[in-house]
């Protein structure tokens, strides 16, 4: 053996590896699933970019700040045009909502009991626990005798409804996904999307409902029953077999709004989805519930704001949440600006921020923005005809991609701006 | 620019007009960096939030990214998740791509960074007793023809050896020897001087050559090549 032999061997091996050391060719279905998951992750990121770091946070903050300003302008315009006496507080609920950006992301903390309904009790491994004094660990069992809210800082807040029993499969330590095994009752969660894809999941007898963001409720119809009901009011979930590691490769990837029912005994054969928003159970804000439960207690202990959502929920006063259990009546719909009105306001706002404020020079924009919406109402494509300044296009498009339209297809919005 | 579902979409048309085989025809190994269609335009549109343009970029580069991730991970475990994360990072960072380097170079850089982050986080992640160990390559000899079995065994052994390299040397070795990236581009990707890249390559090759004897199938290949040399050499020992 000599150096020349080694080199020849190496060259031959490299040649073989170039051709043969490649991943197995995925099937068309697998490619579709992968693509769906990627774009679901992007959707979730764009809807609620609440966490991040460095420049990303700054950019997200600017973006959501813009959306908030635009929404407010549009809401004000709508109010004036309709001469409505609707309180401003209701208009603040207009979509798209602008989440509070994280000022400085804290290290991921394990989940802990944040609040329990007055007179209720939470038992962990059979022992009664007190709010803020119990963090969860893998393998524990949790019984909620009264509505109980748990939080994992800046990531997930979830409500265990009265009478719910769960096992803690993974407690979310070190920033990992939180996984609960639902034995009886219902779990309702508000989940901040994470770059890794899944922040929270609920297992029901070998079927995993994994949450990409942002709001869902999973309930078992009865003790030891196989029937499961999922209400997804925001975001995306995947439903499938729990993986050994990584994200759930769901047999089903579901976008909100969705009311899902299936039997764990025959997932594929019984899976049913209804995307009618009217069929989706009215969501409960777990963090809002903390504020209400805390207000019920006397004397009221100081309630830490475990998540940015908590701060948002605590001030201004949260809207009254429907009862956690039992039939829920939809809240009265608040008048809110339509997507077209939001976009028109966005044009003015974006023109100010990208092309200069009024008074900085004459400006005339005459164009038509066409928004192509997917069947579910999300924005698929935007285009200006004729094109306008790229920065303005980008600014308006960012807003448009966060909107939901009442129906799919093309929506044309004439843009006229003179100043 | 706007297209309805079912109507003509220029980006979809572009995919049809330039199928993957044609796009990859210039080099079956490297991530493509000179597409016949206006990639710069696609990048600009995608950076501006155009989903259709991003979808085309994704379709074009998915296979190449998947291959690089697979080689860097040393198997299929977490492959889909990491590839998804690469494109998610691309989507988020595309607006920061200034075109100062080739898109393929930038994409390599994103991919390498995501894989390295993943490997580091995986090292600190607790493993479960029933969790399968990393699969260097899928063992599908059972269905492979005999003629192919030896080659697959060699590739698996080669993968195991590459996996034993230190991280920095493994990255440059894979990028250069398997992906066909030039040392100058690798220098941009890993943020090191070209000379350092060449040094890492030199030592990576030397270490792999030294490890060939650890894998019987690779040692056998070396023996085969040597004996075929000997049999083809002229009797007088002069160079052919």
Image: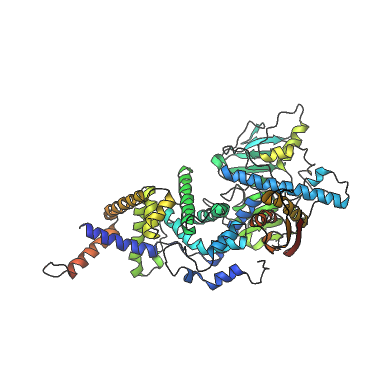
Query: Is B192 above or below relative to A371?
Result: above
Residue drawn 64% across the image and 72% down it: B8
Q: Farthest residue to the top: give it.
A: A299
Q: Farthest residue to the front: give it.
A: A361
Residue drawn 36% across the image and 61% down it: B155
Name the quadrant containing residue B90.
Answer: bottom right
Residue A333: in sight, yes or no? no
Residue A108: x %, y % from top left: 57, 39
Residue B62: in sight, yes or no? yes
Q: Farthest residue to the left: give it.
A: B236
Q: Nearer the viewer, residue A386 or A235?
A: A386
- Asked which colour scheme the image uses, the reply is rainbow
Name the quadrant containing residue A314.
Answer: top right
Quadrant in which the N terminus of chain A appears: bottom left
Q: Nearer the viewer, residue A251 or B180?
A: B180
Residue B23: x %, y % from top left: 48, 69
Query: Is B6 above or below relative to B161?
Result: below
Residue drawn 25% across the image and 58% down it: A6
Q: How many marks?
A: 0
Residue A301: x %, y % from top left: 72, 28
């Amino acid at each position: 053996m000599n150096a020349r032999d080694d080199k020849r061997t190496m060259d031959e091996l490299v040649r073989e590896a170039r051709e043969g050391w490649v991943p197995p060719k995925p099937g068309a279905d697998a490619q579709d699933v992968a693509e769906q998951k990627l774009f679901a992750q992007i959707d979730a990121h764009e809807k609620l970019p609440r966490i991040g770091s460095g420049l990303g946070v700054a950019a997200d903050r600017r973006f959501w700040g813009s959306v908030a300003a635009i929404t407010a302008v549009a809401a004000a315009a709508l109010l004036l045009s309709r001469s409505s006496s609707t309180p401003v507080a209701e208009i603040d609920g207009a979509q798209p909502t602008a989440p509070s950006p994280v000022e400085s992301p804290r290290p991921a903390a394990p989940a802990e009991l944040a609040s329990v309904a007055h007179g209720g009790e939470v038992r962990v491994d059979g022992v009664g626990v007190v709010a803020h004094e119990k963090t969860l660990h893998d393998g524990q069992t949790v019984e909620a005798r009264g509505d109980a809210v748990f939080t994992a800082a800046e990531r997930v807040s979830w409500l265990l409804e009265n009478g719910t029993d769960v096992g803690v499969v993974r407690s979310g330590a070190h920033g990992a996904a939180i996984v609960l095994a639902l034995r009886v009752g219902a779990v309702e969660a508000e989940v901040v999307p994470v770059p890794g894809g899944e922040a929270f999941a609920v297992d029901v007898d070998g079927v995993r409902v994994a949450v990409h963001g942002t709001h869902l409720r999973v309930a078992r119809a009865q003790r030891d029953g196989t029937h499961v009901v999922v209400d997804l009011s925001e975001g995306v979930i995947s439903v499938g077999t729990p993986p050994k590691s990584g994200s759930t490769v769901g047999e089903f990837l579901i976008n909100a709004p969705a009311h899902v029912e299936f039997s764990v005994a025959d997932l594929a054969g019984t899976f049913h989805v209804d995307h009618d928003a009217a069929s989706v159970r009215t969501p409960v804000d777990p963090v809002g519930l903390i504020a209400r439960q805390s207000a019920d207690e006397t004397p009221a202990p100081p309630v830490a704001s475990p998540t940015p959502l908590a701060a948002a929920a605590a001030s201004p006063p949260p809207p009254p949440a429907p009862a956690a259990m039992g039939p829920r009546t939809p809240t009265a719909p608040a008048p809110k600006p339509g997507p077209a009105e939001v976009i028109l306001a966005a044009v003015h706002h974006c023109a100010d921020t990208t092309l200069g404020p009024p008074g900085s020079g004459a400006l005339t924009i005459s164009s038509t923005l066409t928004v192509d919406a997917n069947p579910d109402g999300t924005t698929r494509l935007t285009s200006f005809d004729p094109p306008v300044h790229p920065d303005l296009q980008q600014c308006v498009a960012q807003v448009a991609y966060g909107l939901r339209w009442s129906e799919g297809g093309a929506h044309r919005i004439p843009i006229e701006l003179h100043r | 620019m706007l297209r309805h579902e079912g109507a003509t979409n220029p980006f979809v048309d572009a995919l049809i007009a330039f199928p993957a085989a044609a796009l990859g025809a210039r080099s079956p190994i490297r991530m493509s960096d000179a597409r016949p269609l206006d990639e710069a335009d696609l990048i600009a549109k995608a950076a501006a939030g155009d989903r259709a343009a991003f979808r085309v970029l994704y379709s074009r580069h998915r296979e190449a990214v998947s291959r690089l991730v697979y080689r860097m991970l040393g198997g299929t475990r977490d492959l889909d998740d990491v590839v998804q994360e690469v494109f998610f990072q691309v989507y988020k960072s595309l607006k920061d791509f200034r075109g100062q380097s080739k898109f393929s170079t930038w994409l390599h850089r994103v991919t390498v960074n995501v894989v390295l982050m993943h490997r580091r986080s995986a090292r600190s992640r607790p493993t479960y007793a029933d969790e399968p160990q990393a699969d260097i390559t899928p063992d599908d000899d059972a269905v492979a023809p005999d003629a192919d079995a030896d080659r697959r065994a060699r590739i698996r052994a080669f993968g195991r050896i590459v996996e034993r390299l230190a991280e920095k040397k493994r990255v440059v070795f894979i990028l250069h020897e398997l992906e066909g990236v030039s040392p100058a581009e690798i220098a941009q990707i890993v943020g090191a001087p070209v000379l350092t890249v060449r040094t890492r390559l030199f030592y990576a090759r030397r270490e792999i050559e030294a490890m060939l004897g650890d894998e019987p199938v690779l040692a056998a290949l070396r023996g085969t090549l040597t004996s075929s040399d000997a049999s083809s050499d002229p009797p007088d020992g002069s160079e052919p």
